Image (cartoon, helix red, strand yellow):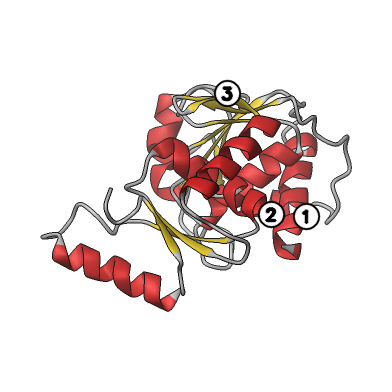
Amino acid sequence: MVSLANAAAKTANALRDAFDLEPGDAVALDLPLHWQRSTWCAGVWTAGCVVRTELTDAPLVVTTADRAEFVRASVTSPVAVVSMHPFGLPISEPLPDGTEDVTVAVRSQPDAYLFEAPDAHATAIDGAVGHMTQEQVLTEASSLAASLGLRPGDRLLAEDSADPHDLWLACLALPLAADTSVVLTRGTHGTGSGSGEDDAVARIAKQENVTARLPTPSA
């Protein structure tokens, strides 16, 4: 939790200071189901900004190196590129003109958030998955946790085959609201015969000591 709070503060400071965003400004997060999505949701919401879940023009678009060229050609907005390195190291490969690696900009920020606290009634999410305030995000996350039977201390395995709306909640709001942990997995569906994919997920679930899955195995 300390590491998440530190990352949220640094990211939020970068949004306000390095990118000159104000509360209410949208940040389009073109990020996969990954801990960086969780970190950037935390930073955007700490800054009082809005997570836009679709790739559209916004005051800032955030993406990954493998998507940078496509995203740069798709929007006119400033494009920030996030490292997918396990330890968040700077991006080593060349990036397209008009994009920038935000690793240094974020890391150089103070560990404590320097601006005004966000408003619980301010918009938190805007996009195809819905339009919700910060308060509503936590309420919906609590409802989702209850529907999954989660209790404090449980561990949820969230797969990228789940409903996109639920995944945006699961990446950050759900574990905060329900006092649980979440394991984010990608690429465990749609590429094999079925049984192999199920085995892969089962191995991850066992290794991570998960107590619930999203979607549920029967879904």
Say what amino acid the circle numbered 3 marks.
Answer: Ala
**Residue lying at 60% horizontally and 54% vertically, measured from the top left:** 175
Q: Which residue is mark 3?
A: 58
State the mark number for residue 104: 2
Q: Nearer the viewer, mark 1 or mark 3?
A: 3
* Camera-nearest residue between 74 and 154: 154
What residue type is disc 2 on? Val
The image shows residue 64 at horizontal and vertical percentages of 47, 47
Instruction: Residue at 46%, 41% (x, y): give it.
Output: 166
The residue sitting at the left extreme is 193
| Marks 3 and 2 in Cβ contact (< 8 Å) | no
Secondary structure beneath disc 2? helix
Position of the N terminus, as image quadrant, is: bottom right
Q: Residue at x 71, y 23 (%)?
A: 24
Relative side of 193 to 29, left or right: left
Q: Earlier in the sequence, mark 1 or mark 3?
A: 3
Q: Is residue 119 above or below residue 10?
A: above
35 sits left or right of 135 in the view = left
Q: Residues within 10 Å of mark 2 (few under 14, many from 20)?
A: few
Residue 32 visible in rendering: yes
Q: Nearer the viewer, residue 31 or 92?
A: 31
Q: Secondary structure at mark 3?
A: loop
Mark 1 lies on a secondary structure that is loop
Residue 41 percent across, percent down from the top left: 62, 43
Work out whether mark 3 precedes mark 2 in sequence or the reverse, and give the earlier one.
Answer: 3
> Among all residues in the image, which is located at the extreme bottom?
207
What distance separates the C-alpha of mark 3 from that of mark 2?
Answer: 22 Å
Q: Amino acid at mark 1?
A: Ser
- Residue 108's label in the rendered image is 1
Q: Which mark is residue 50?
A: none
Task: Tell me: residue 68, above or below residue 89.
Answer: above
Q: Are marks 2 and 1 in contact (CB under 8 Å)?
A: yes
